[in-house]
Amino acid sequence: MGLFGKEPEKSPRDQVREWRSRMRREQRTLDKQIRSIQTEEAKVKKSLKDAAKKGQKDVCGILAKEMVRSRKATNKIYASKAQINSVMMQMQNQLATMRMAGAMQKSTEVMQSMNQLMKVPEIAAVMRELSKEMTKAGIIEEMMDDAFESALGDEDEEEAAEAEVDKILFEVTNGILGQAGAVEDHLPQPEPAAAAAAADSDEEEEDEMRARLEALRS
């Protein structure tokens, strides 16, 4: 604690060291999120295989979409980790620059990466705080959050996701269902006597799968 109760101002070296430490901590948060998604995906994959054996084509479609979304989410998190690594390397470069120029310099690369990282829900709050500190230090300029995504972009993403569904179905069911560009209708048919008894159960499973899909979207 400094004079009049104020914290002493950190040196640039200490500031960068603190930023890098906090970023490594956020990377561990992302690692935990990846493991959670992959654990859930393994459960969904097993459910899809079981649904395919029972001839539940609609359920298979719902589960395949859920797997596409989980893989997309995982890829986005890996991209975020790469951006954090990039920022940490830039911070190290800033220290080298400071030795020669006497002060840290503005960095477009850091600003672009931080702008993207502020959009990642799991780490958004910390990244906003770091961005404010970097702005104060003169490394980046003040940024505005991009609150709205392009509607056209959302539609394109949905179409891309749909294109992956058949690949997931083909992969998980070993070719029984789905192929590149089209879905085959070769699911085994349930026994007539068992089909009537399983109707209510199938509807419950579909409702549950839709609920899980909505939770993944949110």
Image (spheres, rainbow, N blue to C red):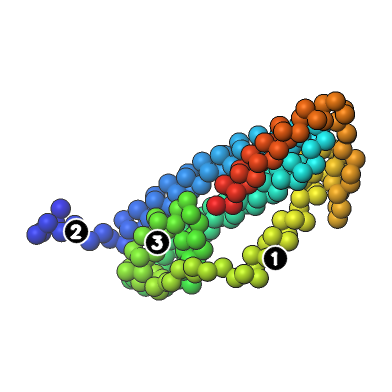
Tell me which corner region of the image, top left, top right, bottom left or bottom right, holds residue 209: top right
Label whose residue precedes the other's in the sequence (1 or 3): 3
Residue 66, image x, y percentages = 67, 46
C-alpha gap between disc 3 and disc 2: 23 Å
Q: Secondary structure at mark 3?
A: helix
Q: Amino acid at mark 3?
A: Arg
For the point 74% across and 41% down, the residue is: 59
Residue on which the image places disc 3: 128
Name the quadrant containing residue 137: bottom left
Residue, x 80% and y 41% (percent of image)? 57
Kindly tell me whether residue 186 is visible in this rendering.
yes
Front-lying residue, 26 or 74: 74
Depth check, front residue: 144 or 24: 144
Structural distance between the alpha carbons of marks 2 and 1: 50 Å
- Across and down, in percent, residue 93 comes to 45, 63
**Residue linked to disc 1:** 156
Residue to which mark 2 is pinned: 8
Q: Which mark is residue 108?
A: none
The relative height of residue 158 versus residue 208 in the rendered view (above or below) is: below
Name which residue lies at 47% across and 45% down.
29
Q: Are marks 1 and 3 in contact (CB under 8 Å)?
A: no
State left or right for residue 95 relative to residue 152: left
| First of labels 2, 1 by sequence position | 2
Please name the residue shown 53% across and 58% down the image.
83
